[in-house]
Amino acid sequence: MKVDGKMNSCVCCTPSTGAGLKVHNKLLLGLLLGTLFALGGCASTDESKPDWAGVKGSAEPAKLVNFKQTARFEVRWHSDIGDQGPDLLQTALTKDAIYSATGKGRLMRLDRATGKQVWSIDTGIVVSGGVSSGDGMVFVGGNKGDVLAYGEDGKLKWKSLVSSEVLSVSQVADGMVMVRSGDGRIAGLNAADGKRVWMYERSTPALVVRSHAGVAIQRGVAFAGFAAGKLAAIRIKDGEVLWEAQVSQPRGNTELERISDITSDPVVDDEQVCAVSFQGHVACFDTAQGNQLWSRDISSYTGLMVLRKYIYLSDASGSVIALDKTNGSTAWKNGDMLFRRVTAPNASGKFVVVGDFEGYLHGLNLDDGSFAARIKLDGGAIVATPIEMDDGLLVRTRGGELYSLSIK
């Protein structure tokens, strides 16, 4: 399988026979075709044995380069919230609280300023998607299709059921919460009572990458990426499809080579929405009609962010790249973290921040991508994108450590 011209990749794939059928058997395909990447829940649970260990011909991760630090990370607080398990569980922020969950079903509220636990409850499910929040509620999803809504006091408000394993739950928008499930569907649930209002579904290829991609929300529209490089704009209030576009076309002779799935959230601003696919392209479209503005042959499974004039992304090999959002031209590229399983980037002040498989957090200068700061966090790999919070960042490690940091 080729990624950016190189034989690469380990993907956590699920066989599929199209929307409408549940995924029956999840297969972790040890594709010994180069570097072994961890997508979502596919990471090795043994941090002492990286995914590429013992693989003949695999590319080992780049060693950390030395540089003169011109900035520094400062830990404001950190809290042990428990192992997130095999799935990529997001953390939700409200004005004064942080909500997080463990794979074993613990849901907790932390004080945003101090990281101290306010309450912790047992949801009774294996949490596979979430956490999200909105309208005074907190939402999690389970591996058997359960969607649970709790009040900010930790009391259960309602319980709903979708068609298969929950992979992500959106924030509340226009009174709706959107739930993505493992069979490729998106259910629009009424946030007040959990009743299903609409369902979006589409056919899927024979083999897809299992991911926890969510939706991007803008002006009453949800933008979502799918298998085979599809991007859709869906009206939130009633589920009407406004347009669909092709980010990338599957290429190759085998089902593995033809995987070209969008495995991360699209990003959207006032005029355009952009998405990137694994073994495919990054492309931007106008939000109104879905007309393609530009496309680049770049592969990523972690995702991208947009900030003012630029799009920042981590490609499949671990390079961090800044693109001009008007035409897709490269502004800068940092290729010093190859095969370190770098997260999608996020911005904090004058810096772009990414995490890696060894628990290092890297701060890059926003203007040229050069290294500015680095810190080693406890708790193993950083797999979730750092979250912007209070003029700093919120970072979760796979082992269950949650950090609030600033970079100056």
Image (spheres, rainbow, N blue to C red):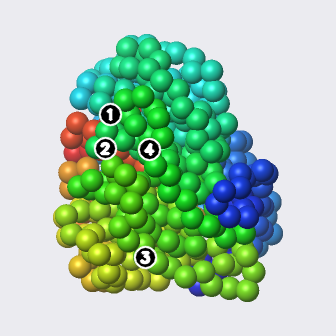
Q: Secondary structure at mark 3?
A: strand
Q: Earlier in the sequence, mark 3 or mark 2?
A: 2
What residue is disc 4 on?
Answer: 197
Q: Is residue 403 above or below residue 209?
A: above
Q: Earlier in the sequence, mark 3 or mark 4?
A: 4
Q: Nearer the viewer, mark 2 or mark 4?
A: 4
Check if mark 3's residue and mark 4's residue have beta carbons within 8 Å. no
Q: CA distance from mark 3 to mark 2?
A: 23 Å
Question: What amino acid type should be assigned to the residue bearing mark 2?
Answer: Ala
Question: What amino acid type should be assigned to the residue bearing mark 1?
Answer: Gly
Check if mark 3's residue and mark 2's residue have beta carbons within 8 Å. no
Q: Neighbour class for label 1 at 10 Å: few (<14), some, many (≥20)? A: many
Depth check, front residue: 331 or 169: 169
Q: Secondary structure at mark 4?
A: strand
Q: Secondary structure at mark 2?
A: loop
What residue is disc 3 on?
Answer: 245
Q: Secondary structure at mark 1?
A: strand
What residue is disc 1 on?
Answer: 134
Q: Earlier in the sequence, mark 2 or mark 1?
A: 1
